[in-house]
Image (tube, rainbow, N blue to C red):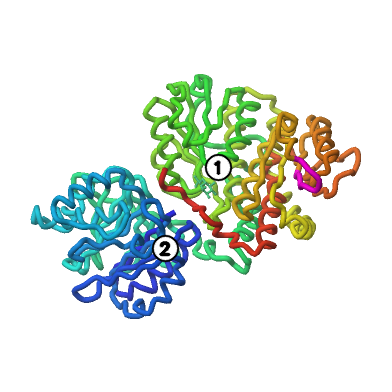
Amino acid sequence: MCGIVGYIGEKKAKPILINGLLKLEYRGYDSAGISTIEGSSISNIKTKGRVSALENIPEIQQLFGNVGIAHTRWATHGKPSTLNSHPHLDNSKVFAVVHNGIIENYTELREFLSQNGYHFLSETDTEVIPNLIHYYFTKNNCSFLQAVHKACSKLKGSFAIEVISTLFPNTMIVVRKDSPLVIGKGNNETFISSDIPAILSFTKNFYLLNDLEFVEITKNEISFYDINLNPINKELKTMEWDATAAEKDGFEDYMLKEIHEQPRAIRETIGSHLTNINSCDFEDITLSKDDLTNISQIYLVACGTAMHAGLVAKNLFEKCCHIPTCVDIASEFRYRDPIINNKTLAIFISQSGETADTIAALKLAKANGAKTIAISNVIGSSITREADFCLYTHAGPEIAVASTKAYTSQIVLLSMLAICFAERLASCDKVFLQELRSEILSLPEKVEIILKENIEQIKNLSKEIYQEKDMFYLGRGTDYNVAMEGSLKLKEISYIHSEAYAAGELKHGTIALIENGITVVSILTDENLMEKTISNIQEVITRGAKTVVVTNLELPNKKYDIIINIPKTSPLISPILSVIPLQLIAYYVSKEKGLDVDKPRNLAKSVTVE
Ligand code: G6P
């Protein structure tokens, strides 16, 4: 979704802003723009299309200023066009604003401003912001900061904004509400961004903003204010992420690099939580045996791939802790009036920690008395600051829109958490838990084996299937859960229609779609369900399907077109292994089709609006 960068310091702002925009491309966008202070005016250059199109506009060579703001836009209000792109200026071209989020009352504000003599050039909700700032600045005869503060008090919805002004050429004001924004501190220079990786090559020192905290930034000073404009102190945090972790590092695409990073991501996520097979340690989650005994319902709430990780974790919480566990799509959870009380534990899973629906669902659960845990990959992200407890996956920055290493890391972390709760509750057989811990510890090596042994086979398979129009994924139990993730990966980056089906459900409708030559990918990792799933695969073979089977079992006969063998593990965590071939199928099919793997059409990495 939209991305923001800002710079204020001694250097030329433009190259730093363009560098930041290029790093934000992965979030998904349709237009880009930049404004810098040039003497006594603001230069504003923007265009529909890619950052490269912005760089090709000749006027951009004339930007020399050292204060500037820039933006990649993902259209919500108004089509992608140069006029609708950010930055937006007020009518008198004194204030320039970039904005992420949605101003819900913009129609009302437009009307108010129109009645006061303002006019609008774009169809966006954003354009009300610079005009509103101008209105209060002139009406109240106040400071720059006070004008931005007053304007923000009238905005409903979500916003992260940067404002610059010709009247205050050495100052920038920024503020956020329900939309991410971080301040990176350099030596006499400040970098602002919606996303840490965009400015990670310039600094590792960050201030993380809470909702409605205002920041006034000059070349050598950063001042923070609360919602009432009282000065506040903020703690400077150092990010452990390495800037090169956000580079491609010799891989053709971020997605391929991130698939290959999974052994390390899993190892680092296991970290100190599981150092030997005797116990899982989560000392920061201070829920005692009594607290856990009191819990009657666990909700796992998330969107997209993170929700699929929740589906796998549901089985673990139910099997290990014997607590009924529900998986909810965040955008459904918040509107379905779920039963929440002080016996509820709600766990929110989000790679970015900034998904608008997940944040809203978390606020709802908290307001209704649930105990809340946030699981995120980004230190200090919104959900981690909102929840009672927070846990981190250590997957490193995930840049490709299609999530891979975040998914496997999330399942690993949730598995260890379920085991830890089972230990505290003494709810489960000790040997069973010990075997599960041992299986988790051996996962990184097993992922390495798949990445070493299966790639050529999957590349060849992709050459055979890349022109398919429809595909199906089948499985039972956790194999069905991973089928859903495999199907989502294929849709996201290869644009092939695909559906995941619980194998036993096939006969109740979907089998009508199976015809000669159609590809059906089945996942088979649970010995107890093997026979049943095999008879479902037989049903599609009989109807002419081409069958691909991902398995770690000794199959009784080899009547399948392609068998992808993976290492054995407990069926409870087998999706961490069986998803790897599915990620690779999606990747190589997309490559065969010549598509942009990392930036699939219409998708955004972080969905920060509802
Ligand atoms: C978007 C991304 C997905 C991601 C989902 C949830 O749809 O394209 O890859 O799974 O958002 O994101 P989150 O950051 O909350 O895990």
Amino acid under label 2?
Ser
Depth check: give the residue in front, 425 or 68: 68
Q: Give the position of the C terminus as an image quadrant.
A: top left
The kind of secondary structure element at disc 2 is strand
Amino acid under label 1?
Ala
Q: Could you tell me if residue 238 is visible in this image?
A: no
Q: Is residue 591 above or below residue 296?
A: below
Q: Give the position of the N terminus as an image quadrant.
A: bottom left
Can residue 422 be found in the magenta stretch? Answer: no
Residue 573, percent from left and from top: 68, 38
Q: Could you tell me if residue 531 is visible in this image?
A: yes
Which residue is drawn at the image coordinates 34% and 48% (left, top)?
Answer: 102
Distance between the Cα atoms at labels 2 and 1?
28 Å
Q: Is residue 451 above or below residue 321?
A: below
Can residue 519 be found in the magenta stretch? Answer: yes
Of label 2 and label 1, which has the lower sequence position? 2
Residue 236 shown left or right of residue 410 in the figure: left
Q: Are marks 2 and 1 in contact (CB under 8 Å)?
A: no
Residue 287, percent from left and from top: 49, 28
Badge 1 crowding class, 10 Å Cα cut-off, few under 14, some 14 to 19, many 20 or more, is many
Which marked residue is nearer to the observer: mark 2 or mark 1? 2
Q: Residue beneath label 1, please?
A: 306
Question: Magenta: predominant secondary structure element?
Answer: loop
Q: Name which quarter of the figure residue 385 lies in.
A: top left
Residue 393, percent from left and from top: 54, 46
Badge 2 crowding class, 10 Å Cα cut-off, few under 14, some 14 to 19, many 20 or more, is many
Asked if ligand 1 lies within 8 A of label 1, the reply is: yes
* Residue range (magenta): 514-521
Q: Residue beneath label 2, please?
A: 31
Depth check: give the residue in front, 519 or 477: 519
